[in-house]
Image (cartoon, grey):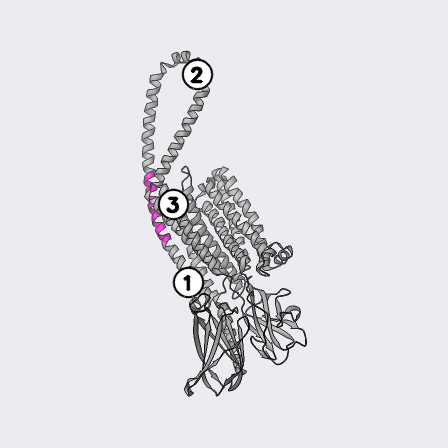
Amino acid sequence: MTSTIAPRVQTLVLLLLAATGLLLAGAGPVSAHAALTGSDPRQGAVVDKAPQQVSLTFSEKVALADDSLRVLDPKGKRVDRGDPAGTGGTTYSVKLHSGLPDGTYTVTYQVVSEDSHPVAGAYTFSIGAPSKTSVSVDDQAAGGGVVGVLYGFGRYVSYAGFIVLVGGAAFVLGCWRGGTAVRSMQRLVVSGWLALTAATLGLLLVRGSYTGSGKVGDIFDLDLLGQVLQTKTGAALVSRLLLLAAAALFIAVLFGAYDKRDDEEKRDLTFGLAIGGSVVAAGLAASWAMSEHASTGLQAGLAMPVDVLHLLAVAGWLGGLTALLVALYWAPVETPVDGAAVRRFSRLAFGSVLTLVVTGIYQSWRQLGSWSAFTGTRYGQLLLVKIGLVVLLVGIAWISRRWTARLAESGAAVSAEAAEEGENEADADADADVEKERVTSGAVTSAATTESGAADTGAGAGSERAAQLARQRAAVDTARRKRERDADPNRFGLRRSVLAEAGVAVVLLAVTTMLTSTEPGRTEEQAAAASSSATTEANAAGALTLDMSFDTGGEDGKGVVRIDLDPARSGANEMHVYVLRPNGRAFDIPEVKVAFTLEAQDIGPLPVVPDHISTGHWSASGVQIPMAGDWKIAVTVRTSDIDQATVSKNAQIG
């Protein structure tokens, strides 16, 4: 039986690791949780005279460094002066040098949102008239590259370590106290502690480069580390390390002194460990809640304790599930996990699931805000995947509960049968001992006289041989009991269902990690609404802005094309075309063409081929609109030699 289980375990583990790797690899750079909602001068604007400063408005407060906001002239030289500063609320500005010449200027920004995630981007505006620019904004990505991958991996490992540490300890202390003497359980909990500690130290080192330059060489920059320690995220990571020191003491007592105490002392020690362990676990969970999604936005004072409960429930369920899996596969025959322990864990898991449902509903409402955000935002789509995985996990858990009931019934029957056999064997042994004493009593005296010399000579060899035979008999007996245990169909069924639960849990953890680094749907929709409002205001002032999504079907073929037409009236107009990725970053494509059609008057299409100005930016001057009306504006984008698409919108011009 065990020979057939091992290959299945290895195959499933490999598949799960591959699936997790695909999820994490596909995550890419984390989405910005603070979105740029406005700017002055605005994106693509052509101003008559040089502004004194550039102002940016975000959807939430952000943290600034000395070079968070930069303004570059067409040759790439910085023209900003002084450090950027807040001007009230969520607006930040940087002053410019006086007397700037005409041309296209590039504004770049790299800040840290209130929930600890880096935000970067760039846009252009022009003074007098657009011009060619040598500035490339392709590298304006936050949280990407090798450093981003390292940081994302560290986050995943830290979550996994927390779940294994807290859930494994809760399983041993609350469900199976016999596990305190089991080496495999000790290794599991210690592994969780080591993983969480190593990941926290790694996150501290990588954090400065992750929110700054993104260079691998800056990971060990002590100046950056000092700056990180002064931030909210740095304080949370240091607090986590201090709590891990207390967790190490908890582990030492649980797997060291606990098993050596008598029953009364164990009861007192259990109470103390339960209280102390709960405080440490809650503190570890709070180190995430105080620095990420829950710490900012709507109802932060309520969201943080709810987030702590959510994390503890996840650890109790998935971490306990991991501990149960280890106990079922690697617990020694002398101390097997019994049906009572499995039933206690089943109750613990049920309570954890209820807590997850309640806290998850609140978190979903807080982060999404509307039903449309479920399908219209990346956060909502990931949340739907997570909900599906949780439902699947609950379904498998229901199967595990059935196997648990059967295992308990079979265990009770085996115990009764073993007790009856033990009584019969005891009676038979007593009769045999009486008979043996009667037969051998007469021969004791003569045997003692005859064999006294030989006994002294062979005593050492005989005792060594007896010890060897005892070890062999013990090994054979252990192997026999292991075969009998593994042959139990109920235990085998429970093993398979718990293994399946653990497999789904690994993927669920990967999706959850991606969720924590994805912009909440509520924030994304608020930023879109603010951007739409800004566009409406610009249109009211005489300019027209249209956003059209496209998908050419090829690699890197999705994005948004933005048309700015000023003054959007009959006669000559200034047109700017911007091509943006779905995450809002500008990128270049081989060709962009625009055509204007006034179908009511059978005019057009009037083709316009704009000139390439900078990354993701094209412009055309003197675009002639012959008369006012409801014009159809069609844009053809080509992303490769064979992949292109045409999208269009109608707009009132004139």
Single out the mark in the foreground, 2 or 3: 3
Single out the mark in the foreground, 1 or 3: 3
Q: CA distance from mark 1 to mark 3?
A: 33 Å
Asked whether the viewer can see residue 245, the reply is yes
| Residues packed near mark 3 inside 10 Å, few (<14), some (14 to 19) or many (20 plus) | few
Q: CA distance from mark 2 to mark 3?
A: 53 Å
**Residue 244 x/y as whole percent:** 55, 49
Instruction: Give the amino acid at mark 3.
Output: Pro
Q: Is residue 388 left or right of residue 579?
A: left
Which residue is drawn at the image coordinates 36% and 16% (left, top)?
Answer: 441
Instruction: Give the amino acid at mark 2.
Output: Ala
* Mark closest to the chain's N terminus, 2 or 1: 1
| Residues packed near mark 2 inside 10 Å, few (<14), some (14 to 19) or many (20 plus) | few
Which residue is drawn at the image coordinates 36% and 35% (left, top)?
Answer: 480
In this figure, which residue is indicated by the disc labeled 1? Answer: 384
Which residue is drawn at the image coordinates 38% and 58% (left, top)?
Answer: 391
Q: Main secondary structure of the magenta part?
A: helix
In this figure, which residue is indicated by the disc labeled 2? Answer: 455
Label 3 secondary element:
helix
Residue 236: name its quadrant: bottom right
Question: Which region of the structure is painted magenta?
Answer: 396-414
Residue 404 covered by magenta stretch: yes
* Mark closest to the chain's N terminus, 2 or 3: 3
Label 2 secondary element:
helix
Q: CA distance from mark 2 to mark 1?
A: 79 Å
**Residue 103 x/y as whole percent:** 61, 76
Label 1 secondary element:
helix
* Mark closest to the chain's N terminus, 1 or 3: 3
Instruction: Give the amino acid at mark 1.
Output: Leu
Q: Which labelled disc corresponds to residue 7?
A: 3
Q: Is residue 306 left or right of residue 223?
A: left
**Residue 238 x/y as whole percent:** 59, 53
